[in-house]
Image (spheres, rainbow, N blue to C red):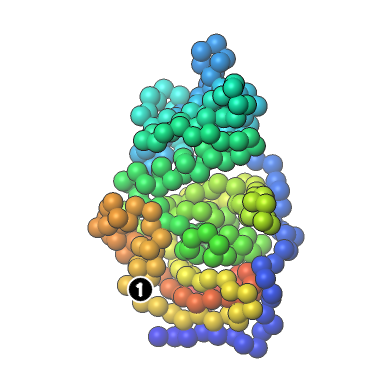
Amino acid sequence: MRHFANNSLAVVPGQEKDRSRVTHQSCSVQQEGQDKVTNLDKGQSRRLAFDAWGVQVALEWDNPDYDEEMSRLLLPNWTHNPELSPDAVFRLTVDPSTGRDRLYGPQASARFVTPPYSVAAVESRLHMHLAETTRQAVYVHAGAVEWQGAVVLVPGRSYTGKTTLVRALVAEGARYMSDEFAVIDEEGLVHPFPRPLSIRGGSDGYIERYDLADQTCLEPKPLALLAAVRFRSGAAWCVQEISAGSAVLELFDNTVAAREVPVFSLECLARAVQGALCLKGEHGGACEAARHLQEFMKLN
């Protein structure tokens, strides 16, 4: 087992704020999504239907002010089909008595949501529904970028530093694939989940989104480097190589449908890590960690 550490490098405190190469950008996909919004019932309702990994979903809402935000929920690698009549429908309606919105979803009771967070609530429930019900692939909590034809995968739940590390990797020249889920198919290929990169800011829950349309990879790619690295303030860069079996367990622990389809999940994950360099450890700063991971990709 190889062990990699670098105590001589200056530790970058906290999570860096350098945004020199990761900026807000316009997205042609956004307009395409708006063009796919279908008006129903003489304009009283709006609808967007699509297929994502064999799961058919429709989004419906009645407030035209949400057209732009709702259209953004259609990711560019999902298949829009206005003719679909899916069982899974997420419906957002205005409650006139309270001024709040009601969110209806499959297999769940309606809940009140408050603008301006209504569409974000739809997005959260939609993504989890897809991750739980897809049976053509598995959804893994992970950040992912493409580098020279292969994937660097950073598994981890929220607050482990994966999004900041993904942003730093893109700043170093990688192409964005996801900061939320990596979708791994039966052949072990990693597919993008290219929602806008989203970073929480402060204690008020504010989320800053970065549109990386012209820095995004939309094709499936093989896994080259799995980096199960967590951010810890003040830590030095320190990682060790782990076995393929240990890497599969790292991914399995972050797989949404692991309990529902354990055998299928393990098969997909095992194929994904074949031939990949797998590391585990910690880092004290995303920019420093990104540079180290880039060096590993060059050597691998």
**Relative to the observer, which residue lies in front, 118 or 298?**
118
User: Would residue 90 be found to the left or right of residue 198 on screen?
Assistant: left
- The answer to whether residue 91 of the structure is visible from this angle is yes
Q: Quadrant of residue 85?
A: top left
Which quadrant of the figure contains the N terminus? bottom left
Residue extending furthest toward the left: 263
Residue at label 1?
246
Can you name the residue that lies furthest to the top here?
42
**Which residue is most to the bottom?**
8
Q: Position of residue 71 (x, y in %)?
A: 57, 33
User: 241 or 70: which is nearer to us?
Assistant: 70
- Tell whether 24 sits left or right of 96: right
Q: Secondary structure at mark 1?
A: helix
Q: Residue at x 47, y 63 (%)?
A: 155
> For the residue carrying disc 1, how many other residues have a C-alpha within 10 Å: few (<14), some (14-19), or many (20+)?
some
- What residue is rendered at 51% in x and 72% in y? 229
Q: Provide residue 74's location: percent of width, then percent of height.
A: 52, 37
* Numbered marks: total: 1
Residue type pointed to by label 1: Ser
Above or below, 214 against 221 in this view is above
* Residue 79 rendering spot, x and y as whole percentages: 45, 35
